């Protein structure tokens, strides 16, 4: 199998240096810079007259002292890079990451080919994000219909809810087929060549696919994704001991299923199985469930998602051996203490789902032909997704995105990385801020997050010498949530009170996965709290949960706000001491000067006016 993208779940023992967020294994990698997104390449020393200098040994990047690109791969027997190319860009792997890169490449005018050895859409579309959301849509409706008290609160009477297992499975499969066809048709319509066969790197700017097809390109992107990680001692038969790949087919709904791992994968499948009538037992190696989530969010989520449901759990234990059901005997699970390694218990269940994370799919890619050595299976890259060889130098014109590089194992992260690479190869330097990329768990209710957890933020503050503040709001105070009788949930923001920088936002509640993007975009754009708290949100909407969150934050008075390129002091008693290169004050329009004299009254008048208008419309 060669899939280009992975399910955005991480509860794996794989770790990478400098990671700052994950479940049992961290998946967020701290970027060198957090604010390079969207900057022109000239900002980093690039200009039409300052092009890359190529010699026989390396490519020098004039604006970056430490970056060296090795060209030694050309002397490894695979020949020198070709002088002419079949394509501008070749992408190995046609999942969500490869698809995003291909579409952006075509938009930029690049002749592009994408190679897929399995099916277009990769893991996400065929065995991950997409079919799992179809199953979760069913579980959400089942929960609502089964909750008699909830339905009576609306004045509704519903007879006993039931389901057809095959119909549910068909819904998931049909959705995956539809999205896969959409991805395929979109690439064909834009002129992307879709090449079928297993792809591998043959040498510098050379790719082999299928049996003996060789093509060349100016640049190559590896986007081969990941596969389910199965620990040693676990025997998967695809029937009674399964991975997420098998579970999404929903070939059965066992009465009692053990789920090994309580990260994203485990949580979502517990939501599905319990809604369909199964009893669930979690097996978690760490001392608490839902590792990697913000601790406060985990505590509340456990109270809502686990404790009231038919779920029990064993924490601090390893499943050292799992034997599939056979000859009328149940699935046997042998547990040992995670610390002492002493035998702890033996479970007999109807089925077991292995939800211990994902492993990069990088075997057989010909990486040895360009002197690349994987690290625990991951392809090493720098912050620009450029592949690093065994000597620690950059491989010319070779990039790796998505789960295969391990920076952040999320489908949308892979797509963003692919777009970032295309920006670079078309002349615009771009560094993706991974701390601005949101993540979500589609349970009922949902969990979402972006940036740092509270412990991580406080650790960072102690190291770098700044204070960290936390503010929270409740869904119980939101009109729309109460109208839906879904007041269970909170939103939490971690920030710097000295300058208003948003360090992290975590949401547990109705449509949390949709609400997180205002916060993630704020982090990506460098928007400060003192700016965004002035934004207007429609009433009554769930977005007001974040509105109240921003407004509740207390930012010190000397912090600055930004309107366009002009910065305005919130403390009007302090004179702006900034000057231009010539020592003069920067030019600001007369309108902005008027605002800067009385910023609070200006925005206050707008805010009051909007509230007055809303009161006339809705009251």
Image: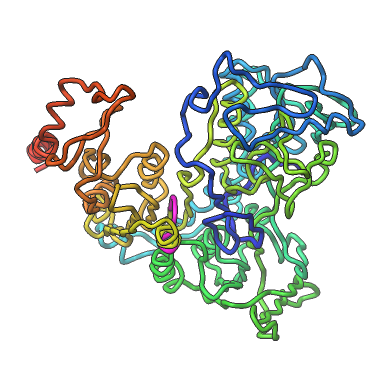
Q: Toward which corner of the image does residue 59 lie, by quadrant? A: top right
Q: Is residue 106 above or below residue 24?
A: above
Residue 370 percent location from the top left of the image = 81, 36
Q: What colouring style does the render use?
A: rainbow
Name the residue: 58% across, 36% down. Answer: 417
Image height check: is 425 above or below 471?
above
Q: Residue 129: image x %, image y %? A: 57, 47
**197 on left or right of 282:** right
Q: Can residue 160 be seen from the camera position used here?
A: no
Q: Is residue 48 magenta?
A: no
Residue 553 or residue 396, whichever sits in front: 396
Frontmost residue, 454 versus 320: 454
Q: Is residue 571 left or right of residue 126?
A: left
Asked whether residue 470 is in view, the answer is yes
- Image coordinates of residue 610 in percent, x first then y, are 13, 36
Q: Nearer the viewer, residue 79 or 301?
A: 79
- For the point 18% across and 26% down, the residue is 592
Query: Which residue occupies 57% across, 25% down?
Result: 104
Quarter in which the N terminus is drawn: top right
Q: Residue furthest right?
A: 77
Placement of the C terminus among the 4 image quadrants = top left
Residue range (magenta): 449-455
Q: Position of residue 359 (x, y in %)?
A: 70, 54
Look at the picture and state if 340 lies above or below 81.
Answer: below
The quadrant where residue 254 appears? bottom right
Looking at the rendered structure, the number of numbered marks drawn on it comes to 0
């Amino acid at each position: 199998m060669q899939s280009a993208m992975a399910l955005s779940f991480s509860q794996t023992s794989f770790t990478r240096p400098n990671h700052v967020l994950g479940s049992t294994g961290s998946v967020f990698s701290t970027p060198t810079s957090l604010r390079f997104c969207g900057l022109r390449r000239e900002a980093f020393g690039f200009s039409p007259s300052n092009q890359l200098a190529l010699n026989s040994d390396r490519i020098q990047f004039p604006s970056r002292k430490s970056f060296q690109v090795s060209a030694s791969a050309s002397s490894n027997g695979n020949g020198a890079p070709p002088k002419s190319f079949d394509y501008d860009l070749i992408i190995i792997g046609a999942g969500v990451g490869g698809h995003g890169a291909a579409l952006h490449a075509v938009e930029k005018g690049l002749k592009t080919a994408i190679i897929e050895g399995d099916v277009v859409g990769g893991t996400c579309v065929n065995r991950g994000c997409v079919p799992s959301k179809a199953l979760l849509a069913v579980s959400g409706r089942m929960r609502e219909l089964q909750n008699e008290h909830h339905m009576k609160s609306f004045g509704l009477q519903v007879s006993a809810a039931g389901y057809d297992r095959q119909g549910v499975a068909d819904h998931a499969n049909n959705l995956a087929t539809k999205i896969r066809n959409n991805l395929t048709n979109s690439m064909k319509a834009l002129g992307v060549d879709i090449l079928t066969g297993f792809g591998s790197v043959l040498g510098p700017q050379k790719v082999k696919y299928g049996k003996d097809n060789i093509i060349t390109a100016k640049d190559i992107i590896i986007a081969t994704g990941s596969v389910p990680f199965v620990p040693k001692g676990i025997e998967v038969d695809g029937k009674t001991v399964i991975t997420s790949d098998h579970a999404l087919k929903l070939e059965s709904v066992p009465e009692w299923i053990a789920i090994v791992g309580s990260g994203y994968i485990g949580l979502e499948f517990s939501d599905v199985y319990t809604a369909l009538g199964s009893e669930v037992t979690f097996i978690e190696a760490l001392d608490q469930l839902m590792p990697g989530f913000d601790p406060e969010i985990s505590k509340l989520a456990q109270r809502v998602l686990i404790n009231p449901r038919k779920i029990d759990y064993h924490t601090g234990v390893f499943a050292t051996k799992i034997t599939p059901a056979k000859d009328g005997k149940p699935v046997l699970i042998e547990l040992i203490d995670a610390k002492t390694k002493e035998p702890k218990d033996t479970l007999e269940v109807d089925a077991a789902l292995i939800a211990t994370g994902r492993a990069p799919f990088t075997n057989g890619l010909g990486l040895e032909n360009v002197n690349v050595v994987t690290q625990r299976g991951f392809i090493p890259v720098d912050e620009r997704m450029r592949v690093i060889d065994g000597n620690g130098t950059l491989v010319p014109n070779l990039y790796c995105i998505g789960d295969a590089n391990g920076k952040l194992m999320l489908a949308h992260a892979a797509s963003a990385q692919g777009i970032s690479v295309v920006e670079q190869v078309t002349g615009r330097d771009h560094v993706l801020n991974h701390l601005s990329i949101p993540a979500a768990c589609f349970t009922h209710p949902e969990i979402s997050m972006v940036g740092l957890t509270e412990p991580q933020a406080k650790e960072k503050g102690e190291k770098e010498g700044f204070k960290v503040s936390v503010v929270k709001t409740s869904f119980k105070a939101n009109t729309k949530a109460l109208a839906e009788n879904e007041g269970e949930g909170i939103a939490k923001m971690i920030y710097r009170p000295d300058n208003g920088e948003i360090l992290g936002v975590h949401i547990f509640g109705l449509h949390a996965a949709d609400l997180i993007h205002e916060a993630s975009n704020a982090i990506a754009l460098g928007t400060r709290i003192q700016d965004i708290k002035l934004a207007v949100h429609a009433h009554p909407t769930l977005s007001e949960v974040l509105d109240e969150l921003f407004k509740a934050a207390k930012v010190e008075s000397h912090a600055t706000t930004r309107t366009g390129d002009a910065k305005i002091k919130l403390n009007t008693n302090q004179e702006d001491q900034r000057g231009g290169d010539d020592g003069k004050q920067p030019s600001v329009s007369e309108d902005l000067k008027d605002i800067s004299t009385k910023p609070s009254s200006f925005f206050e008048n707008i805010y009051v006016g909007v509230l007055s208008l809303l009161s006339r419309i809705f009251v």
